[in-house]
Image: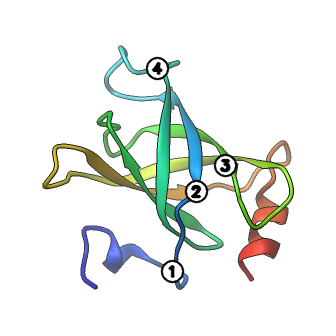
């Protein structure tokens, strides 16, 4: 499959349809900063996610993610950078989130689950 972010991938992604919440931390559009949006994952890897959203979250934004994984215990808190963003044919949006390392996040547990 060839999509907007495939050339930037560093790990293999797996289809995943999980509910997550995205909070915009930094964004060129100041009206989005602080907004929390309910989204769905499309695919995931140890280092990133492709996310479907009804709200456009532009490339270059920093977002926090709360992911409720059906196959795992509890929720994961992760922080990420939006690497690309596109409009879908049904009027929604998809974006690629590259996960960041952080001591206050669940990145280690997330990577172990994706291994």
Pointer 4: what residue?
Answer: 33
What residue occupies the far left of the structure in this picture?
Answer: 89
Q: In the structure shown, which secondary structural element does the residue marked by tag 4 occupy?
A: loop
Q: Earlier in the sequence, mark 4 or mark 1?
A: 1
Pointer 2: what residue?
Answer: 18
Percent coordinates x, y for residue 66 in the rendering: 67, 42
- Asked whether the beta carbons under mark 2 and mark 3 sit within 8 Å of each other, the answer is yes
> Between residues 50 and 11, which one lies in front from this camera angle?
50
Considering the image in quadrants, where does the N terminus appear? bottom left
- Asked whether the beta carbons under mark 4 and mark 1 sit within 8 Å of each other, the answer is no
Q: Earlier in the sequence, mark 3 or mark 4?
A: 4
- Alpha carbon of mark 1 to alpha carbon of mark 3: how far? 21 Å
Percent coordinates x, y for residue 51 in the rendering: 43, 54
Q: Classify 77 as above or below 89.
A: above
- Alpha carbon of mark 2 to alpha carbon of mark 3: how far? 7 Å
Percent coordinates x, y for residue 63 in the rendering: 54, 38
Q: Crowdedness of circle 4 by 10 Å Cα count: few (<14), some, many (20+)?
A: some
Count of marks overlaid on the render: 4
> Which-is-in-front pick, marks 4 and 2?
2
The image quarter in which residue 21 lies:
top right
- Alpha carbon of mark 1 to alpha carbon of mark 2: how far? 21 Å
- Asked whether the beta carbons under mark 1 and mark 2 sit within 8 Å of each other, the answer is no
Q: Earlier in the sequence, mark 2 or mark 3?
A: 2
Pointer 1: what residue?
Answer: 10
- Alpha carbon of mark 4 to alpha carbon of mark 2: how far? 23 Å
Q: Is residue 74 shown left or right of residue 111?
A: right
């Amino acid at each position: 499959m060839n999509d907007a972010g495939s050339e930037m991938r560093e790990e293999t992604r797996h289809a995943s349809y999980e509910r997550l919440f995205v909070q915009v931390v930094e964004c060129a559009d100041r009206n989005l900063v602080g907004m929390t949006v309910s989204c769905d994952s499309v695919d995931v890897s140890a280092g990133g996610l492709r996310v479907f959203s009804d709200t456009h979250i532009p490339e270059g934004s920093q977002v926090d993610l709360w992911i409720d994984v059906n196959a795992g215990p509890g929720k994961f808190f992760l922080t990420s950078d939006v690497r690309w963003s596109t409009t879908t044919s049904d009027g929604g949006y998809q974006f690629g989130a590259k996960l960041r390392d952080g001591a206050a996040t669940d990145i280690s547990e997330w990577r172990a689950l994706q291994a």
